[in-house]
Image: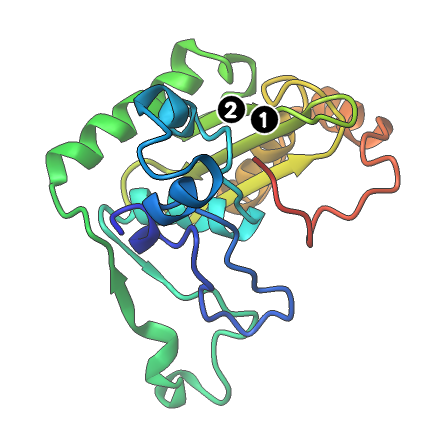
Amino acid sequence: DMVMSFGPGTKLGTDLPYDRPGKVPSVKYYDKVFGKNGWRSNTIVSLGIGQAELLLMPLQMANVVATIANRGYYYIPHTVKGIGNEKEIDKKFKEKVYVGVQNQEAYTNVIDGMQRCFDAGTAYYSRVPGVVACGKTGTAENPHGKSHAVFMAFAPREKPQIVIACLIENAGFGGTWSAPIVSLMMEKYITGKVTRPELEKKMEAVDLIQGKNLITTEFH
């Protein structure tokens, strides 16, 4: 229930046509698969790193990061902010959804780790000039071929403005491909310009999608 309060395993209620719940396996699920008392802690340990039976939509990944960036709440994702002028925006677009974790120290610890991903970790070469960003790389295993490159991030750390979840099918390591793309997008959004033309050209020149549809795919 705690995990699902962040969005995984449930439909977010977005107005997008591909809203799917994904899957967060429950006790009932494991009892059905392995039989009652037929599974142990080592059966589910890999869930802690996002593997095994856990399935997430890219939008759910972004929503989890948005919740972390907001320190405990998110807004239901919508394609339209509102209709009419600023005073007429429907209240539903501004409603905060609070999750099951409200311990601010817990969020600080997670955000510290996400900042270190840029400062000295797997996203070190994707640092955003002049911006303190926080992120997490990932390499989603693919039983049918090459792994999927994953990266999720928000910036700036304080008063965050943008959250991005990037998944590139069959591209390999998240830190190699997804992180640079996210870095360039965040820099452009926050500063209005890109100061790394060589990196931009490199990302524009490479073809990593290979005809896949990223939007409607669930990753684990």
Residue 132 visible in the current orientation: no
Left or right: 17, with 9 as reference point? right
Q: Which residue: 51% across, 24% down?
A: 137
Q: Is residue 167 left or right of residue 107?
A: right
In the image, 41 versus 70, the foreground residue is 41
Q: Position of residue 55 (x, y in %)?
A: 53, 43
Q: Is 164 above or below relative to 121? A: below
The residue depicted at 28 percent of the width and 30 percent of the height is 111
Asked whether disc 1 touches disc 2, contact meaning CB atoms under 8 Å apart, the reply is yes
Q: Secondary structure at mark 1?
A: helix
Between 147 and 128, the residue placed more toward the observer is 147
- Inspect the image, locate mark 2, and give the three-letter code of the amino acid beneath it: Thr
The front one of 116 and 60 is 60
**Which of the two discs, 1 and 2, labels the residue nearer the N terminus?**
2
Q: CA distance from mark 1 to mark 2?
A: 7 Å
Q: How many marks?
A: 2
Q: Is residue 177 visible?
A: yes
Residue 30 image-quadrant placement: top left
Check disc 2 and report its element: helix, strand or loop. Answer: strand
Q: Residue at x 50, y 58 (%)?
A: 21
Residue 137 numbered tag: 2
Residue 183 in which image quadrant:
top right
Q: Which picture quadrant has residue 36?
A: top left
| Label 1 sits on residue | 179
Name the colouring of the figure: rainbow
Considering only vertical position in the picture, is 106 above or below 76? above
